[in-house]
Image: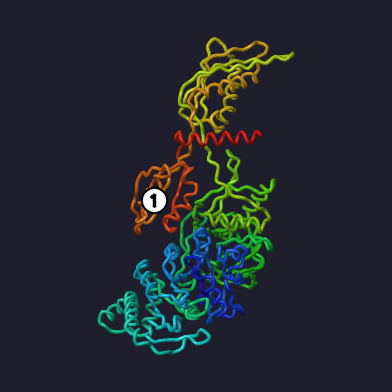
């Protein structure tokens, strides 16, 4: 196997476009499997996870190699739903080209797939799938592609249909008709008369793209000369590798029609790892550099994916970025600063592990049970360590509370999610120190629902989801003075402490304690006790039991007993004074307010701003961006936007995104505050019962 004979290709596109079925047909055509599985039947090679079988949709990337016409093609199948964007990014990070799968009509998934390919500047081909469907309309789809993605989209084929079925194609390069035989192969056919003009049109579009790859070809094009077949093929490959052309092919993966032509196209036109891949990395001195794949270099691996397999342990999926990788090798993990023992290496075909003796530069492989290595780590030379640039994962957009159905399963939840985080770095999990609530974060409701399902099926723990508890605060708006007297006499030594404290709004969130006691009314040794009592009191306000902030307390007077006064007495006296003062100091409820940066296409601006106003939000500004996108800068209470990820996706057909960050606390409107306080008191009453 030579690196020049490798093709690493990722399948991208909206959910339901048939990516997994396309991969299945490729494997079948190559003889890698002996029967065509069906997603609907749960028996495909790549959708092999129980969660994928249940959903009948991919939720994680899968890889499968096959041999075709002297080359090895590594196909990476990715999920189409945006809740699993982390999986798509992992797939894009280690390939050299992409197949964007579309069908019936353009979707936001096609736009996102194009953006993912652009993010790494990788060549791409578009495959219009499901052309066997009776209502399939290639001209409509192609027109939408051209409008959405622009000039690079160039049809290389036109469909020939009879009785509502795809029976052949017109080749845009040769202008010849080709029809499908019983085995899905293309054989010579007759060009329908009504397609001659349309065929000539796509041939001229293709010629224009080819002309732009070479000054001599450009001169020939403007001179009205036709290109030879060899000139078109050569120029087309240059244009594809320069990302100035995204050829459009067609077929139907479910019926395995047109798939072999796509496989031929991948081998003939898509680049090998040596042709255009450039990797960003950092050396031991922190210098940012670039490298090309070097077949003769020191073996260097980039771990792009981790699979938490409950049966065989953790699998690390890697790309060989330089050199040749062999089993039983000691490598250095530059990210962790530790040696790592590589045992048996293998390639994956879905769930099947196929042991190999070596993997050449550019190939994709896997290894089990590495001790310290995780996703985005680089394994290589200890004498000249490098760190290859990590795949940037999106920040979680949705956070929900997670509660075990059975008491005592909290540790199981933590352990299970920890393993799922190895597999999916987008997941976040923490326990809110203030509310004690366990919180899980993901890209959307489907993402979190998948986490819940995997906790049950893999780790045997059932959970329920709930809204996150809002960490409200309390404060006061009026200056008051209150007295606290603690007096206790029960036969032995008594307890006596009296304080007079002034409470007023403070400038800092933390309690500000001062003293202005004259004449030794309260001895200095009891000042810390008074402060301790107040610090314990502000943890639970009198209004609804939330922490009290922005409070200044000044000890102004008091009394003590030379025998009975003790520290505990002044702690209790301070608590009594606090409770008395809070009733008269006009306590109010505060809520967390978050800044929001919302990114949406311009056409959704009115809807987004109107919706933000309904959420008690404030739009602070708007900034134009590239590609007709707009940034909306706003602020909104967290109670109104903690599920914003779901709502924004619905409002923008998943074209919008956002970032949010806590900025401050603000007073809750009185009508809303009353409901919150009543609910809090009810919960406190239920807890006491």
The C terminus - image quarter: top right
- Picture coordinates of residue 207 (x, y %)? 33, 79
Q: Nearer the viewer, residue 44 or 567?
A: 44
How crowded pointer 1 is (Cα within 10 Å; few <14, some 14-19, many 20+) is rated as many
Q: Nearer the viewer, residue 295 or 581?
A: 581
Residue 433, by quadrant, is top right
Tag 1's secondary structure? helix
Q: Residue at x 49, y 31 (%)?
A: 509
Q: Kindly identify which residue carries mark 1.
A: 608
Q: Which residue is the extreme one toward the left?
A: 223
- Picture coordinates of residue 629 (x, y %)? 36, 56
- Note whether residue 471 is visible: yes
Q: Nearer the viewer, residue 554 or 374?
A: 554
Q: Does residue 389 lie above or below 361 as drawn?
A: above
Q: Does residue 670 lie above or below 430 as drawn?
A: above
- Picture coordinates of residue 140 (x, y %)? 37, 73
Residue 489, by quadrant, is top right
The N terminus - image quarter: bottom right
Q: How many marks?
A: 1
- Note whether residue 348 is visible: no
Q: Does residue 445 lie above or below 261 as drawn?
A: above
Left or right of 609, for residue 35: right
What color scheme is it? rainbow
Left or right of 674, for residue 498: right
- Picture coordinates of residue 136 (x, y %)? 43, 75
């Amino acid at each position: 196997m030579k690196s020049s004979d490798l093709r690493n290709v990722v399948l991208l596109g909206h959910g339901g476009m048939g990516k997994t079925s396309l991969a299945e047909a490729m494997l079948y055509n190559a003889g890698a499997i002996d029967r065509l599985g069906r997603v609907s039947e749960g028996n495909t090679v790549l959708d092999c996870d129980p969660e994928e079988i249940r959903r009948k949709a991919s939720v994680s990337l899968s890889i499968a190699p096959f041999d075709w016409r002297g080359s090895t093609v590594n196909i990476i199948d990715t999920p189409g739903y945006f809740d699993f964007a982390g999986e798509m990014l992992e797939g894009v990070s280690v390939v050299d080209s992409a197949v964007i799968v579309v069908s019936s009509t353009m979707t936001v998934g096609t736009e996102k797939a194009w953006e993912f390919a652009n993010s790494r500047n990788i060549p791409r081909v578009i495959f219009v799938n499901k052309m066997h469907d009776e209502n399939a309309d290639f001209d409509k789809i192609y027109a939408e592609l051209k409008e959405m993605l622009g000039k690079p989209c160039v049809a290389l084929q036109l469909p020939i249909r009879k009785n509502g079925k795809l029976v052949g194609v017109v080749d845009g390069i040769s202008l010849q008709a080709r029809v499908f035989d019983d085995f899905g192969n293309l054989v010579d056919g007759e060009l329908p008369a009504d397609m001659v003009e349309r065929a000539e049109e796509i041939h001229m579009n293709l010629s224009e793209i080819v002309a732009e790859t070479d000054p001599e070809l450009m001169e020939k094009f403007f001179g009205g000369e036709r290109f030879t077949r060899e000139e078109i093929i050569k120029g087309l490959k240059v244009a594809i590798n320069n990302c100035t052309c995204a050829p459009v092919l067609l077929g139907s993966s479910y019926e395995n029609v047109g798939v072999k032509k796509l496989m031929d196209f991948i081998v003939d036109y898509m680049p090998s790892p040596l042709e255009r891949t450039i990797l960003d990395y950092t050396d031991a001195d922190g210098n940012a550099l670039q490298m090309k794949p070097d077949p003769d270099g020191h073996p260097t691996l980039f771990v792009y994916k981790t699979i938490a397999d409950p049966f065989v342990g953790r699998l690390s999926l890697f790309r060989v970025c330089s050199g040749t990788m062999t089993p039983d090798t000691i490598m250095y993990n530059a990210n962790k600063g530790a040696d790592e023992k590589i045992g048996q290496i293998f390639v994956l075909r879905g769930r099947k592990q196929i042991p190999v003796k070596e993997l050449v530069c550019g190939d994709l492989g896997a290894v089990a049970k590495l001790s310290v290595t995780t996703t985005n780590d680089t394994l290589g030379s200890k004498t000249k360590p490098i760190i290859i640039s990590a795949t940037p994962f999106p920040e979680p957009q949705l956070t929900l509370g997670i509660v075990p159905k059975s008491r005592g399963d909290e540790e199981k939840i933590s352990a299970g999610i920890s393993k799922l985080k190895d597999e999916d770095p987008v997941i976040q999990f923490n326990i809110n120190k203030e509310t004690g609530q366990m919180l899980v974060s993901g890209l959307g409701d489907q993402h979190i629902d998948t986490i819940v399902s995997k906790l049950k099926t893999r780790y045997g723990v059932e959970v329920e989801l709930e809204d996150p508890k809002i960490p409200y605060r309390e404060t006061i708006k009026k200056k008051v003075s209150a007295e606290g007297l603690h007096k206790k006499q029960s036969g032995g030594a008594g307890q006596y402490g009296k304080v007079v404290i002034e409470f007023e709004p403070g400038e800092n969130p933390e309690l500000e304690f001062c003293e202005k006691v004259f004449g030794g009314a309260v001895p200095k040794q009891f000042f810390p006790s008074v402060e301790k009592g107040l610090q314990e009191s502000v943890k639970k306000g009198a209004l609804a039991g939330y922490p009290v902030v922005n409070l200044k307390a000044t000890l102004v007077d008091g009394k003590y007993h030379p025998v009975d006064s003790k520290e505990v007495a002044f702690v209790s006296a301070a608590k009594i004074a606090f409770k008395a003062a809070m009733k008269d100091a006009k306590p109010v409820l505060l809520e967390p307010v978050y800044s929001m940066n919302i990114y949406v296409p311009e056409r959704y601006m009115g809807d987004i701003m109107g919706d933000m106003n309904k959420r008690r939000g404030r739009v602070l500004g708007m900034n134009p961006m590239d590609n007709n996108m707009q940034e909306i800068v706003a602020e909104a209470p967290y109670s109104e936007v903690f599920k914003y990820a779901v709502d924004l996706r619905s409002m923008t057909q998943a074209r919008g995104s956002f970032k949010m960050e806590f900025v401050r606390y603000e007073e809750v409107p009185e009508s809303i505050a009353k409901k919150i306080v009543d609910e809090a008191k009810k919960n406190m009453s239920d807890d006491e019962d």
